[in-house]
Amino acid sequence: MSASALPVVIVGAGLAGLSAALELADSRSVCVLAKRGLTEAATPWAQGGIVGVLGDDDSIEAHVQDTETAGAGLVDDATARFVSQHSARAIQWLLAQGVQLTHDARGPMGLHLTREGGHGVRRVAHAADATGRAIHEALLERARAHPNITLREHCMAVDLITHRHVQRGSPACHGVYALDVEQRQVLALPASAVVLASGGLGRVYRYTSNPDTATGDGVAMAWRAGCRVANMEFIQFHPTCLYHPQDRVFLITEALRGEGALLKLPDGTRFMPGHDARAELAPRDIVARAIDFEMKKHGLDHVWLDATHLGEARLLEHFPTIHERCLALGIDIARQPIPVVPAAHYSCGGVVTDLNGRSDLPGLYVVGEAAYTGLHGANRLASNSLLECVVLGHAAARHIQGSTWTEAAPVPGWDESRVEDADEQVVIAHNWDELRLLMWNYVGIVRSSKRLERALRRIALLQGEINEYYASFRITPDLLELRNLAVCAELIVRSALARPESRGLHFSLDYPEPLPASFPTVLPGRRI
């Protein structure tokens, strides 16, 4: 059989995966895997918006400059320029797919644009304060209706099928092993190409704004297959996650500060002007460290984000989701400040790819948060992430469409002959809790070499226990996620130890100043 007759398998049903799928589907058969329900991707959690260089007061050069400033010297200029140049086309494509962005007759393309931290002008298109949900619902509806797209829920990727499994030819990706969670069966899915669009790894930390699905699956699978990863030390902690005993994963969008909300101490004093001239509109790394500093200085569990002066009408118009969610918890944001804390939010590193989404392994593409393209450098500029998903998702699809194919290799089935059902799950639960807590305590917003070395030693012990368990018992979703998170934790710590400076999202007590010149941290691939 020709490899071109096989489907393209896309791991992940968020914006990156659906963008690639819809771009491919008119010419190729596509199978999209969602490890949980189709609506449980990270995309619907995105509140703020998507960058579009649209206004007369804006330019590609200005957007690139803002991206590079936020990225603290590690942004790849060619990547930033490529993504920015395609931003207007990405917005147009979303509108053509039926995405309902907030309208403003006076705005470019009839859209209301807002401003977020690090941006010099208003250039963020949005759907009120639920942009990700509006985008995801529209694209999912398109994907469900397309005859060439198969959507498989509750189907979790286990590992990539490579030349080592088919025992022929040069290094290449030939498909995916995937666990059908409901049938408790591992499937061998041969593919003409595989696209990892599996999202981030925020669940490696105890406190995160990410959904439960963000367990670093794509990064871990690609690393095990021998791909390089880069800049894994740069974990963005969103400055303002809701602090409430009933809800500690709800994100308070940066756009609220863009519209004028102020960060304050319990006595009502603003503190951001004392940390940065841009105050509340400083890049996320600066704001998160400032909040962390003030909390430790004053012994606080949280700080306050005050939007009361914006007025109820304005808040209801632009931030209805935040208003409703907070009100359900007893906080009226039109009359009360919001308690907020930083939380792990976004990984600026990932699997090394080019501008076509290609990884080191032929046939394997990586797009979205799982990829490292050089766009985000040492700190992601707000709302560049959704833009990257569309632009690189489309680029990967176009490259796949233009590729030539050889005869497909027979793919072996999954071998369970030497494992049995686990007699208890306590090992998984205990190691999961320990891993996330040690990452929060030792590899958080502020780091030290001693903490990092201690974390690396403990992660190695945990990995030994996890791998022994994996080799002995039938796999479960919890085991797969724990295995992947442990790999990602190791990569984050190893990358952090390799950077003897403070830059962007990586702040070291032992090396508090940036080096005169700095480069991406690239870990060479190895097969595990």
Image: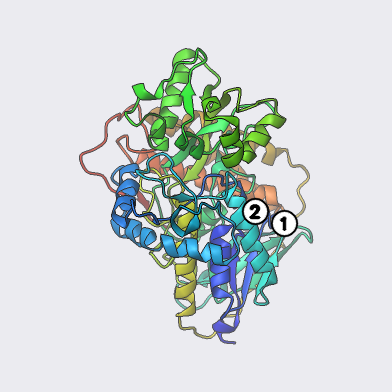
Q: Nearer the viewer, residue 227 or 290?
A: 290
Give the structural element (helix, strand or loop) at label 2. Answer: helix
Q: Which of marks 2 and 1 precedes in the sequence?
A: 1
Residue 90 in sight in this render: yes
Image location of residue 279, percent across then percent down: 38, 29
Gap between marks 1 and 2, in whole Å? 7 Å
Residue plotted at (27% across, 31% down): 513
Q: Which residue is mark 1?
A: 419
Compared with residue 24, is residue 2 higher up or lower down, i.e. above or below?
below
Q: Nearer the viewer, residue 509 or 258?
A: 258
Residue 223 in view (yes/no): no
| Front-most of residues 256 and 3 | 256
Q: Residue at x 68, y 47 (%)?
A: 478
Nearest the camera: 494 or 146? 146
- Would residue 422 appear left or right of 276 to someone viewing this image? right
Specify whether 17 is left or right of 328: left
Residue 136 location (% of width, % of height) = 62, 57
The residue that disc 2 covers is 471
Seen in the picture, residue 13 relative to 288 is either above or below; the reply is: below
> Which disc, if any, is residue 332?
none
Residue 72 at what x, y percent from top left?
31, 42
Left or right placement of residue 253 versus residue 425 in this view: left
Q: Residue furthest front?
A: 106
Residue type at numbered disc 2: Ala
The N terminus appears in which quarter of the rendering? bottom right
Secondary structure category for the residue under label 1: loop
| Position of residue 24 measured from the top left corner of the image (x, y, whole percent) | 55, 74
Say few, some or many: other residues with alpha carbon within 10 Å of mark 2 (under 14 / 14 to 19 / 20 or more).
Answer: few
The amino acid sitting under disc 1 is Val
Residue 208 picture quarter: top right
Circle 1/circle 2 CB separation < 8 Å? yes
